[in-house]
Image: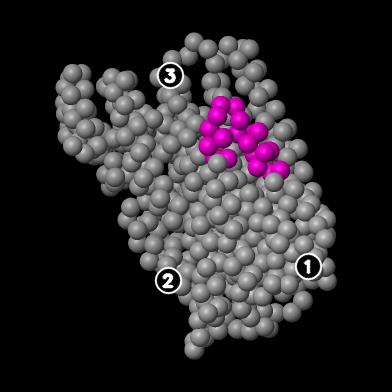
Amino acid sequence: MSKVMDVDEAAATSSADHGFGTSKDVEKGGFLARIKGQRQDLNELGKEYFQQSQQYDEEQLKRDSIKVRRKLDFIVLPMMMMTYMLSFLDKQTLNYSNAYGLQADTHMVGNDYSWVSSALYFGWLTGAYPWQILLQRYPIGRLIGIMLFIWGSVCMLQAAVFSFQGFFAIRFFLGLLEAVISPAFIILTSMLWTREEQSLRTSYWLSVNGVSSILGALLAYGAGHASGLAIPQWKLIYLIVGALTFAWGFVILFYLPDGPHNAKMLTEYEKVVAVWRISQNQTGLKHHVIVPEQIKEALLDPKSWLLFLMAICYGILNGGVTNFLSAIIAGFGYSPLKTSLLQTPVGAIELVVVILFGYLSKVPNTIGLTIVLGCLPGLAGLIGILKIPIEHRFALVGMCWIQGVLGSPVILNWTLPGLNTAGHTKRATVLGVYFVIYCAGNIAGPHLFLANEKPRYPTAIKGLAGSYGAAIGLQIIYTTYCWLENRAKARAGLLDNVSSTEVAMEGFEDLTDKQNKHFRYRI
């Protein structure tokens, strides 16, 4: 029998035992009818789903929650991974196309390429906070699906650009569109998985950056062998990636859920189980109303400012490494084709390490330690690029490969606002400001690479190393602060003698992490 049949049969049995009817009655329940044709506050809906879950035996819910988690892991998570892979692949296309005459064909001179690298993040910076407001008010799945159609079309338009100014404008609008992906997936992850599961699932959907790097390098390598084309080879890369993105938009529009309440792959009973699963997160589902008091709390919370400072560090690192890795490798004397091929190990390293550190972060009270450990290999690699003699070309390339580890501390740091910020307006504010600052760092990062400092770029390498050091120090302070907050609540007895039902119901009241006295920070 299928998993769905097992769940439905269990639901029918339990419902009959409690006198609430069969699972078909649940499907036709009054609260589902009330939301049809109107937008109901998702926290209220989540509360009603949670109350429905109280009809069932807790042991049954625990058994069935495993089946629900597997459905989400094997259906929703791959959709998120594919979308994020395309997002990163699009960002990387600039890096790969640079090896095939992009700058000459678009008449770029001096630091024009650095400005084009930054253009995407100017767009992301512009869209970061407005997207947070839209994500709080409108369905996530449909918002991303529609965005993919536009984003794919704009990506293909890069093949029609013949000037620096035109390329800058196109990359700006791409950044404006793609700014929705990361915060949307952080919010969606917090609505579908438990707090203990979120860091690993987030690591999974970011680990595809490694797959994207491999595919992008191979795509660039294949484009380099294409002959007899009516267009330059670098334009072919944009056409292929844009077409893939546009086609994928249909899948996301019709199948990516906005939360557990409308996940098409779940039966109505399984949606009840899904809400019960995440009820202990104490962050609810989503509240459509903007609460000004929560904006004020977000901006006065010391934890927020520690996150903002870390965002600038990781932004500088990401902007520098993502856009100039090929230039560094090429500077060691490799041809364009060889440079493209030599970048594939970066993706493989990122794929393995991000998932590995994601599993490590599941160990209780280790997420801060995991982020710090994730910074150390990249820092060591930067020191190697600066100090290893230039004649040891392959050793220097190996130091570049190590930079693939950067994805792990970046994504785990991204999870912290979702894990440790409650109150939907507060979380939206923290995420919005976080990504605005992160984008500012991505804009600044490429400009550390001065054209007259090839191939080692000492100013850039020292700046990136300093960013790693600052990120490590700030993470230690952030983790210590959260630990002290938890200890203060424990000493006051706020974390003791509280029923799980009471804690869960508080989570649907749109309380902030400071207002909810039973909220425990993940460290």
Tell me the element at label 2: helix
> Residue 5 appears in which quarter of the rendering?
top left
Asked if marks 3 and 2 touch (Cβ < 8 Å), the reply is no
Q: Amino acid at mark 3?
A: Ser
Q: Amino acid at mark 2?
A: Ala
Which label sits in the foreground, 1 or 3? Answer: 1
> Which region shows up in magenta?
357-376
Q: Amino acid at mark 1?
A: Pro
Residue drawn at (59%, 38%) of the image: 416
Asked if marks 2 and 1 touch (Cβ < 8 Å), the reply is no
Residue drawn at (62%, 21%) of the image: 486
Among numbered discs 1 and 3, the one appearing first in the sequence: 1
For the residues labelled 2 and 1, the Cα–Cα distance comes to 35 Å
> Residue 53 appears in which quarter of the rendering?
top left
Label 2 Cα crowd, 10 Å radius (few <14 / some 14-19 / many 20+) = some
Tell me the element at label 1: loop
Relative to 14, residue 231 above or below: below
Q: Which residue is mark 1?
A: 455
Which label sits in the foreground, 2 or 1? Answer: 1
Q: Which residue is mark 3?
A: 500
Q: Considering the image in quadrants, where does the C terminus appear?
A: top right
Relative to 246, residue 504 above or below: above
Give coordinates of residue 190: x percent, y percent.
47, 38
